[in-house]
Image (spheres, rainbow, N blue to C red):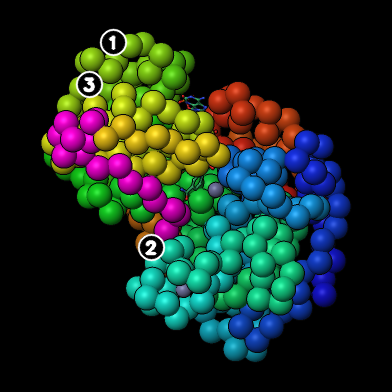
Amino acid sequence: MLTVNAIAATSATDPLVRTTIERRDVGPRDVLIEIRYAGICHSDIHTVRGEWGEVAYPLTVGHEIVGQVTEVGSEVTKFSAGDRVGVGCMVNSCRECDNCRAGQEQYCTNGNVGTYASVDRDGTITQGGYSTHVVVDQDFVLRVPESIPYQAAAPLLCAGITTYSPLAHWNAGPGKKVAVVGMGGLGHMAVKIAVAMGAEVTVLSQTLSKKDDGLRFGAEHYYATSDPATFEALANTFDLIVNTVSAPVDLAAYLRLLRLDGTLVSVGAPPEPLPVPVFALFGARRSFAGSSIGGIAETQQMLDFCAERGIAPEVEMISADQVNEAYERVLKSDVRYRFVIDVDTLR
Ligand code: NAP
Ligand code: ZN
Ligand code: ZN
């Protein structure tokens, strides 16, 4: 076992603290990664605060991980020491169910093993990326292209793939009008990726305070959802709406912005159920859908796509001691657009 420095939550209400955690010995198919950067996803906050259900404390979260390989097991063929790699939201799955065989490990019918707060194959609870090292099966490790700036790459492992996957699935591209609701960590990546795919992108944010940024990321239009006129002006407009909001939204209001056969996909994961207003669906044969991260092959595809297109997250680098403050700022939508922990400050 390897004892490594980490940041952990000890309860749903206390601040996160510095601690140490154990990493398993490097098995034959495992890769030991020295973590350099770890992004802060809103899911980390939902999880540590117990909003999605009970978790076992102490818990180290973090599932936007990049770093370098420092050791590989005897049967590892995909990676070697020195490689720049990433780990996202899952670290294992059954590999045998229909969905795993189809490369959709995130939808493993036996339940994928999450990077944190899941039961690992050895019965322990997985611990995430706010730590200096992690040991992961090679099949759940991604290659991070050198052309993506090291400091900015981590958020691609969750925010990037979680928006790339539904945009690709629902064919965001030339001739398609795509709206992104909420421009935080996921939302700003949804804008950049949808623009790169060729779609005409509109941002729907609570206010116009980030309009210049949205246009700089390539959006053509930017509206405030606090203004009721927005919902009149944009009725029956979009082929696809990607909802990234971490709190409940008025689904009826957004569904009415879809044109015939349009889809509203929620990737935002508020703890409360969202009541589906069926009459807003009937109105133009609209669909309401959800989407969870992406498969491993698709995650690699997304990383390569971002490298080719020169797309990277906008990040604000913080030290290990600023995590609690960063959480408060995320909760106030005061994030431009992803906090990333410089893990060297944990060593
Ligand atoms: P984030 O950085 O906090 O961004 C969420 C954005 O939603 C905010 O920046 C804000 O955008 C808007 N917003 C926040 N509270 C709002 C409210 N009360 N009403 C209206 N708009 C509000 O969070 P994130 O890391 O992008 O994550 C977003 C959500 O996706 C979280 O629920 C997270 O758990 C979930 N998630 C899901 C998956 C998946 O696989 N499906 C993966 C990762 C994350 P504006 O300031 O522009 O209004
Ligand atoms: Zn996440
Ligand atoms: Zn499976």
Rendered location of residue 65, percent (x, y): 61, 56
Residue at point 39%, 41% (across, down): 266
Q: Earlier in the sequence, mark 1 or mark 3?
A: 1
What amino acid is found at the position of numbered circle 1 in the picture?
A: Ala
Residue 234 disc label: 3
Which residue shows up at 38% across the image and 71% down it? 99
Instruction: Judge left or right: residue 300 versus residue 229.
Output: right
Range of magenta residues: 279-295
Residue 181 quadrant? top left
Cα–Cα gap, marks 1 and 3:
9 Å
Which kind of residue does numbered mark 3 sit on? Leu
In this rendering, the answer to whether 66 lies above or below 335 is below
Indicate which disc residue 298 carries.
Answer: 2
Image quadrant in which the C terminus is located: bottom right
**Residue 229 bears which disc, if any?**
1
The answer to whether residue 229 shows anywhere in this view is: yes
